Image (spheres, helix red, strand yellow):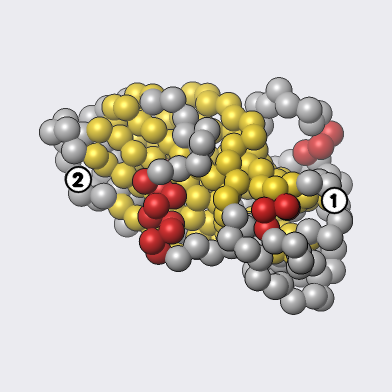
Amino acid sequence: MLAIILVGAFALRRRRTDAYDESDYVDGAYVEPVAAAPMVEAAPLPVAAIEREEPEYVSRSEAVADVEPAVGALEDLEVASVPADEVAELTAAAAPVAERPWLEFAMRPVRAGTNVDEALVEIELTVGNSGSVAAEDVRISTFLLSSDADGSEMERLLVDPPADASTDPVTIQPGEGKRIDATLALLKSEMGENLPESFRPIVVADARYTLADGSEGRTSASFTVGVTPEEGEGLEPIELSRAAMHDNVGAELHGEPVRA
């Protein structure tokens, strides 16, 4: 069975109760997330214009070295319903398979960087149901990798996610959605003794749900997160050598999505 992924551009206002205040989120120019090519054409998402101060761009001339594979999990998590007009943009295209749920993703990194002990990535992950049937028992998992895991390791992590990486099961009705506001943390001490100057973290997102016949539907994908450059395209790696958080971040689809 199939599922679909949209990595769309969402200008979703963060609803957090963590230690950061609103001034933390007006340092950098807003950058739209990179959209994965959908199997079904969807309408583009509106982006609200927000005036922000110019972000701090850091030059990274050092080559990115390999780091030891390590897995980080959720440090902070909120699950919220998404307003109907926002879900409508995500689920605008009709599901290609009738009479079943059809989950779609939109993932936007909000901030990324490091503190003294950890690498951190803050994300907004929206899961919408464009199908004609409710998605029951939806378990949404998200976690952080320090480097690219091979196929068997990635599959193991998806089957058995890190502790506290999954939300409690939820039901997503047709035309409705859930948004996961999460901070993903990865200890520097688990990335090896000789840390490189910088690295490219990978965010993994997975949603599994129960179909009417008792089988399991699944949508999963991984995304490389980096700092958007002042000029040019692509993403620059995130520094490990100094503690700094960056608002000017973006994501690129990493590998091929998994659909079932």
Q: Would residue 244 appear left or right of 77 to someone viewing this image?
A: right
**Is label 1 in a helix, a strand or a loop?**
loop
Residue at left offset 73%, top offset 52%:
188
Image vertical order of residue 192 relative to residue 183, above or below: below
Asked whether 230 or 122 is in front, the reply is: 122
Q: Nearer the viewer, mark 1 or mark 2?
A: 1
Residue 184 placed where, x, y %? 63, 42
On the question of residue 40 being in view, the answer is no
Q: CA distance from mark 1 to mark 2?
A: 47 Å
Check disc 2 and give the amino acid type. Val
204 to 172, vertically: above or below = below
Crowd class of label 2 (few under 14; some 14 to 19; many from 20; radius 10 Å): few
Front-most of residues 87 and 172: 172
**Label tally:** 2
Residue 213, quarter of picture: top left
Q: Residue at x 38, y 24 (%)?
A: 170
Relative side of 173 to 64, left or right: left
Mark number displayed over residue 97: 2
**Residue 96 at x, y = what percent?**
23, 48
Q: Position of residue 123 (x, y in %)?
A: 61, 42
Amino acid type of the residue that numbered disc 1 sits on in the rendered structure: Ala
Secondary structure under tag 2 reads loop
What residue is shown with label 1? 243
Name the residue nearer the viewer: 154 or 141.
154
Q: Residue at x 62, y 52 (%)?
A: 32
Given residues 70 and 2, the one toward you in this image is: 70
Residue 71 seen: yes
Residue extending farthest left: 213
